[in-house]
Image (tube, rainbow, N blue to C red):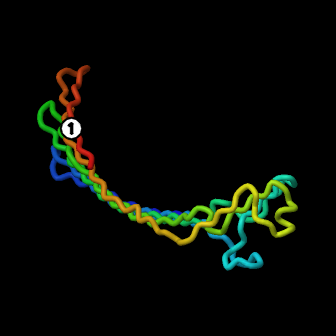
C-alpha cells in the first residue's frame, strides 16, 4: 500500500528571478502478517516451519514472516534561479524526514529441521536445526536528510558554457 501527495509552486518574481517550491509526502506499508487461524499443538504461537528432508516437505508459512515495514517520507525542496548577464545562478536545498518503524524477528515462530521424518513423527528433538527467537523488537529507522547546493552556469560563448557548483549533503 503506497500513498503519495506532491505539491509544486513555481513563482516568477521578475524576469531574472524565479523560485520553485515542492512539498511531498509518501507513505508505504509493506507489512506481511502470518495468519493466526492455525495453531500448532503445544505451541502458543502461530504455525512454525517444519522441514522433513527425507520427504522433501516444508510445512508452514513463509519463513521470513511476520514482518512489518512502514515508511513515512516528508520532503521540502526550494530552488531559486537568478539570471545576471551571462551567468545563470541557481541555489537551493532539499530537506527530508523519513520515519520508518520496522519489525522482523528471525525465526519467531520456530524453525525445526529433521533429516528423517521419523524424528518428527516419534516426537524426537530435531536432529538438524531447532531454533526459536523471542520478542518483537521494533527498529525505528528515522532519518533527517539535508541537501544544499549553489551552481553557476557561466556562458562564455554561444557554444561554450562552464558549469561550476558546490553541494552539501548531511
Q: Is residue 161 left or right of residue 3?
A: left
Q: Which residue does the image show at 84% across and 56% down from the upper left?
A: 116
1 left or right of 146?
right
The single residue placed furthest to the left in the displayed view is 85
Res. 70 in view? yes
In the depicted view, which residue is nearer to us: 72 or 42?
42
Quarter of the image with the N terminus in it: bottom right
Quick check: 157 above or below 148? above
- Find residue 110 and report its horizontal and vertical position in percent: 67, 66
Question: Measured along the vertical axis of the image, is residue 133 above or below residue 83?
Answer: below
In depth, the one of 51 and 70 nearer the eye is 51
Q: Residue at x 16, y 39 (%)?
A: 83
Instruction: Give the image location of residue 58, x and y in percent.
Output: 79, 58
Q: Secondary structure at mark 1?
A: strand
Look at 28% across and 56% down and name the residue there: 95
Q: Position of residue 86 (x, y in %)?
A: 15, 30
- Residue 72 appears in the picture as rendered: no
Determine the residue positioned at 56% across, 65% down. 105
Which residue, given by chain and number where applicable, does mark 1 sit on?
166
- Label 1 Cα neighbours within 10 Å, binned few <14 / some 14-19 / many ≥20: few
What is the number of callouts on the image?
A: 1
Relative placement, left or right, of 90 versus 58 is left
- The x, y position of residue 98, in whole percent, is 37, 61
> In terms of image quadrants, where is residue 151?
top left
Q: Is residue 137 left or right of residue 121?
A: left
Residue 74 placement: quadrant: bottom left
Amino acid at each position: 500500500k503506497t500513498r503519495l501527495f506532491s505539491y509544486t509552486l513555481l513563482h516568477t518574481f521578475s524576469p531574472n528571478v524565479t523560485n520553485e517550491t515542492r512539498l511531498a509526502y509518501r507513505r508505504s506499508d509493506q507489512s506481511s502478517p502470518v495468519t493466526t487461524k492455525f495453531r500448532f499443538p503445544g505451541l502458543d504461537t502461530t504455525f512454525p516451519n517444519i522441514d522433513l528432508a527425507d520427504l522433501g516437505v516444508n510445512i508452514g508459512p513463509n519463513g521470513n514472516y511476520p514482518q512489518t515495514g512502514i515508511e513515512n517520507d516528508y520532503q521540502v525542496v526550494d530552488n531559486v534561479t537568478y539570471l545576471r548577464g551571462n551567468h545563470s545562478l541557481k541555489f537551493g536545498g532539499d530537506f527530508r524526514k523519513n520515519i520508518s518503524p520496522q519489525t522482523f524477528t528471525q525465526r519467531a515462530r520456530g524453525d525445526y529441521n529433521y533429516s528423517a521424518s521419523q524424528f518428527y513423527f516419534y516426537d524426537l528433538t530435531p536432529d538438524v536445526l531447532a531454533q526459536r527467537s523471542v520478542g518483537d523488537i521494533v527498529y525505528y529507522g528515522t532519518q533527517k536528510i539535508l541537501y544544499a547546493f549553489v551552481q553557476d552556469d557561466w556562458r562564455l560563448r554561444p557554444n561554450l558554457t562552464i558549469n561550476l557548483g558546490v553541494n552539501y549533503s548531511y
